[in-house]
Amino acid sequence: MNAADPEGEQKLAICAGCSCLCDDIIVLDGLPELPECEVAKTWFDTPSPRMKIYVEGENATLNEAIDRAGNMLSSANSPLVFGLDGLSGQAQTAAWSVAAALKSCIDISLQNQERAGVVALQTSGKSTATIGEIAQRSKLVILWFTDPALTHPRLFERACRSAREVIVIGSQTDSNYGVDCTPIDLAPADALDALKILNLIVARSENVNELDENQVLESTGQPLETWRQLAEKIQSSHYAAILHGKPECDAPELLTERLYEFVVRVNKNSRFVSLGVGEPLNSTNAEHIISANCGFPFAVNLHPHPQFNGFEYSADRLLKQEAIDCVLISSTLSLKPEDLHGDAALNRIVLTHEPERWKDKATVVISTGVTGLDQHGDWMRMDGVILPMPAVRDSTETYNATDVLTAIAKALKSDDSSHQ
């Protein structure tokens, strides 16, 4: 994929293949010069979506699709707007405008586990840092149920170049991080017990002395001394960082809360930060946009005024209960038709990169380009830094999600009939 002509037109691109958002990709004459990263190669090989529009499974014009979508949403009693995790910041703002005009429910995705960090943040607070700060200062790096060598291949070189020691907690890995690496085997089901013990040790609680070593070994698979040494190593480090994934467990919100609590507690005496190694989606940016407009981060009912009650108004719950009579799915980057509950194809409006897959699964289907490849737009990196992603390809060959959502918002009827 490397271009041979050094005299060609050169520009920079950003790779959104993972949440690192590497911004040093050189594009020469339209071809990206890629690093040794399979994730980046897969991302830049993503084909452009065909410019297709379907209404009830038949080819249609953009104006016909917009009018039909506007009529469907305006006449619905209980509409829902969701799928913001695969949109640029500009398109997310346009999707919010649709929901605000309808006073509908709005949510980001179907994945409730992805919201664990938001719920935990509200309870325990959070100590975090940018990739740049961690790269400059952290001598000790802990990998908590994540193997970035596989999922985020360039994260370690970008965020951990000052690291002298790595502690890998979770499943065993064959990845080589080039520094002293200490593995601590821990099953996802035992992670909550391990964090409870670490919090007790760092808090110097009297309850630590009451811990039964056999019970600790049974509940975590590791002796108590392993957790004592880990806590001591973190506290004695000048600067330490924990890069964490999302282990499968029964209580993801509680697990993330305990992790944040542990990091904040260590910070009373030394510098310790956490950074979530997430999916290559723009979910956090969507949370910020919704919060800025109504004060709540996700799963909000805007009728008659913004209401938030945990997962009560989440897309997953509303669709399972069939409480929605029309849904605007504003991106399908993390969604397939089989992920939805029930057979409500006649009540779906879908903006997607895969129009053929949704052709018979929705009333209105509009193909839209991929941010960073077909169209420009803002995307949030894993550390909360927003980067403007330029388009690598000719964006005139695809429909822009921001423009489509803005047109849908304008097509809504202006009556003030209330939604239930």
Image (cartoon, grey):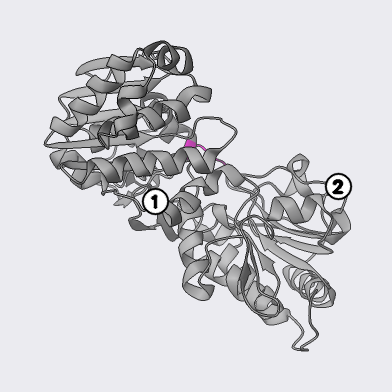
| Spot occupied by residue 213 in the image (x, y as percentages of width and height) | 37, 13
* The label number, if any, that marks residue 342 in the structure image: 2
Kind of residue at disc 1: Ser
- Residue 326 vs 279, above or below: the answer is below
* In front of the other: 200 or 66: 200
Name the residue located 36 percent from the left edge and 44 percent from the top edge. Answer: 261
Q: Nearer the viewer, residue 275 or 122?
A: 122
Q: Position of residue 353 (x, y in %)?
A: 64, 49
Q: Which mark is residue 195?
A: none
Number of marks in the image? 2
Quadrant (top left, top right, bottom left, bottom right) of the N terminus: top left
Residue kind at label 2, given as amino acid type: Gly
Q: Name the residue at 46% across, 72% down.
A: 292
- State the extent of the magenta-drawn residues as a range: 43-47
Counting residues from the N terminus, which is met first, the one under dot 1 or under dot 2?
A: 1
**Which residue corresponds to the image point at 77% horizontal and 48% vertical from the top-left?**
358
Residue 279 coordinates in the image, percent (x, y)? 48, 41
Neighbor class of circle 1 (other Cα within 10 Å; few <14, some 14-19, many 20+) is some
Q: Nearer the viewer, residue 357 or 225?
A: 225
Magenta region includes residue 45: yes
Main SS class of the magenta portion in the image? loop
Image quadrant of residue 232?
A: top left
Query: In what element is the residue under mark 2?
Result: loop
Mark number, residue 124: 1
Marks 1 and 2: CB-CB under 8 Å? no
Residue at mark 1 to residue at mark 2: CA–CA distance: 37 Å
Residue 183 occupies quadrant: top left
145 w.r.t. 159: above or below: above
Q: Nearer the viewer, residue 3 or 370?
A: 370
Of the 4 image quadrants, the one containing the C terminus is bottom right
